[in-house]
Amino acid sequence: MAEPKAPAADQALAILTHLAAQRGPAPAASIAGALGLPRSTTYQLLAVLQERGFVVHLPEERRYGLGVAAFELSSGFSRQQPLTRLGRPLVAGVVDRLGESGHLAVLHGRDVLYLVEERAPRRPSLVSDVGVRLPAHLTASGRAMLAALPPAQLRALYPDRAAFAERQSGPADATPWTYSRLKSVLAEVRVAGVAGEHGEVTGGLASVGAAVLDHLGWPAAAIAVTFAEGSADELVGAATDAVTEAATTLSRRIRGAR
């Protein structure tokens, strides 16, 4: 990689990124070691970040964690709705390309929350309208994101059978949902690189979705497209390619990469 033009800024951002990826506050020595920085430089940068409120020092624990200013940055990120702004034209492009309806969703607990819904001309209205929540394990978008979660996080979301909500208005599914069944479904998603569902949200309709990953590899969102169940293989293949490309592009954009 090329040397950064502002090395101090690059190092400070590396510290913040490192702290954001930890489960809790970290010692300065471990930060320096993980980033390959001199300890003196690490302490100087931490002091500046602490003064600005981006880092907090816990003297009793001899550790550093993220400060209030870092939280304010994340709040500003949410207020500006960058996922919606960056994702909407990509979803619209998928819809134009396929002539089928598409959407962008995020994971919210065990639900997916739809942020963007673009309906193709002469296609039926979908239940996945903006602001709607659906059980993540039943949707292509949700499965794509759940497949990207670490096993411990997935298990925490689904500790028992009671965690698997069913859609009262959806088609009947004779096979009960269990954690083992979910793991099997998500294993197939990881192999395929995309997730699908067939009539589990709305009878007669199927969907395919791909996860949008942040800089840590966590699922930030998913892009999906919905079409008639039993559609030609050519359409399913084109939909798979379209959502994969759109999700990959959005992943790059939210990371600040071109």
Image (spheres, rainbow, N blue to C red):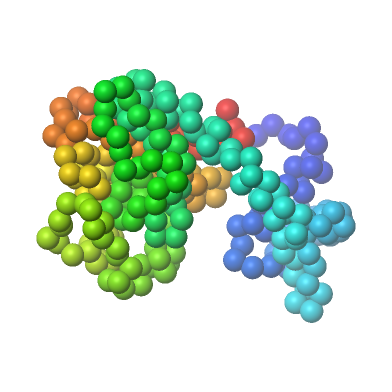
Q: Residue furthest bottom?
A: 60
In-front residue for pair 121/173: 121
In-front residue for pair 195/5: 195
- How far from the left and from the top, in percent, is residue 100? 29, 27
* Side (left or right) of 89 relative to 36: left
In-front residue for pair 59/246: 246
- Please give the name of the residue rendered at 79% of the width and 79% of the height, measured from the top-left corner: 60
* Side (left or right) of 18 relative to 141: right
- How far from the left and from the top, in percent, is residue 142? 36, 50
- Please give the name of the residue rendered at 72% of the width and 52% of the height, measured from the top-left corner: 72
- Please give the name of the residue rendered at 76% of the width and 54% of the height, measured from the top-left corner: 69
* Side (left or right) of 244 relative to 187: right
| Residue 115 position (above or below residue 246) | below
Q: Quadrant location of the C terminus?
A: top right
| Residue 99 position (above or below residue 74) | above
Q: Quadrant location of the N terminus?
A: top right
Q: Quadrant of residue 114?
A: top left
- How far from the left and from the top, in percent, is residue 138? 28, 53
- Please give the name of the residue rendered at 77% of the width and 49% of the height, measured from the top-left corner: 12
* Residue 127 in view of the camera: yes
- How far from the left and from the top, in percent, is residue 122? 26, 23
| Residue 48 position (above or below residue 5) | below
Tally the marks.
Answer: 0
In-front residue for pair 17/116: 116
| Residue 190 position (above or below residue 258) | below
Q: Quadrant of residue 53?
A: bottom right
* Residue 192 in view of the camera: no
